[in-house]
Image (cartoon, grey):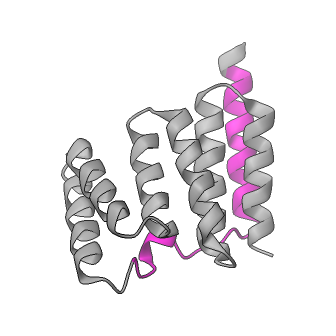
């Protein structure tokens, strides 16, 4: 029964996300930095992640964050990796930190709220997940 309800919730969340027109531009398609070292580290991290080397990708993003600790795009990408690794609470915290630096970047803020929503879903916090997905939808307006 729980599996059935979870499936219905996920289907409803996906439908709501699609119907509200949440930002179509993925935050990672935005420029990461003007700093060449940060850009090189981010590109290496993305390549490692694409090849399934998540720990190496995390290390590269962490090094980039030591150079630019206020870079919301780096926090966002690290949050995505932690979500993939099943570290849901850490993913949520990293996405929240990204939102703290994101300012008026609605695409990035929406992406962070989607990560938070997914992390909450995985942890079984369905009302919290819905709240996060609603906040992601608000960023599209």
Residue 88 location (% of width, % of height)? 52, 34
In the rendered image of this protein, does residue 107 appear above or below residue 135?
A: below
Residue range in magenta is 4-32
Q: Quadrant of the C terminus?
A: bottom right
- In the image, 94: left or right of 12? left
Q: Quadrant of residue 121?
A: top right
Q: Quadrant of residue 62?
A: bottom left
Residue 140 location (% of width, % of height)? 74, 73
Can residue 10 be spotted in the picture? yes
Q: Residue at x 27, y 62 (%)?
A: 46
In the rendered image of this protein, does residue 60 appear above or below residue 21?
A: above
In the rendered image of this protein, does residue 43 appear above or below residue 56?
A: below
- In the image, 92: left or right of 70? right
Can residue 52 be spotted in the picture? no
- In the image, 82: left or right of 59? right
Farthest residue, direction bottom? 34
Q: Is residue 7 magenta?
A: yes
Q: Quadrant of residue 130?
A: top right
Residue 80 location (% of width, % of height)? 45, 51
Task: Say which of 124 and 77 sits in front.
Answer: 77
Q: Residue at x 71, y 15 (%)?
A: 2
Q: Residue at x 80, y 54 (%)?
A: 134
Q: Chief secondary structure of the magenta span?
A: helix
Q: Quadrant of the N terminus?
A: top right
Number of on-image labels: 0
Q: Is residue 35 magenta?
A: no
């Amino acid at each position: 029964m729980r599996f059935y309800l979870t499936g219905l919730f996920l289907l409803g969340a996906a439908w709501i996300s699609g119907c509200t027109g949440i930002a179509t531009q993925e935050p990672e398609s935005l420029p990461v930095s003007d700093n060449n070292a940060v850009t090189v580290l981010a590109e290496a991290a993305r390549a490692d992640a694409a090849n399934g080397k998540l720990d190496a990708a995390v290390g590269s993003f962490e090094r980039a964050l030591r150079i630019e600790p206020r870079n919301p795009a780096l926090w966002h990408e690290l949050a995505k990796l932690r979500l993939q690794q099943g570290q849901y609470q850490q993913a949520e915290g990293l996405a929240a930190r990204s939102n703290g630096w994101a300012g008026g970047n609605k695409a990035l803020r929406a992406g962070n709220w989607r990560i938070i929503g997914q992390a909450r879903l995985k942890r079984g916090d369905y009302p919290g997940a819905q709240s996060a997905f609603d906040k992601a939808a608000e960023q599209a307006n």
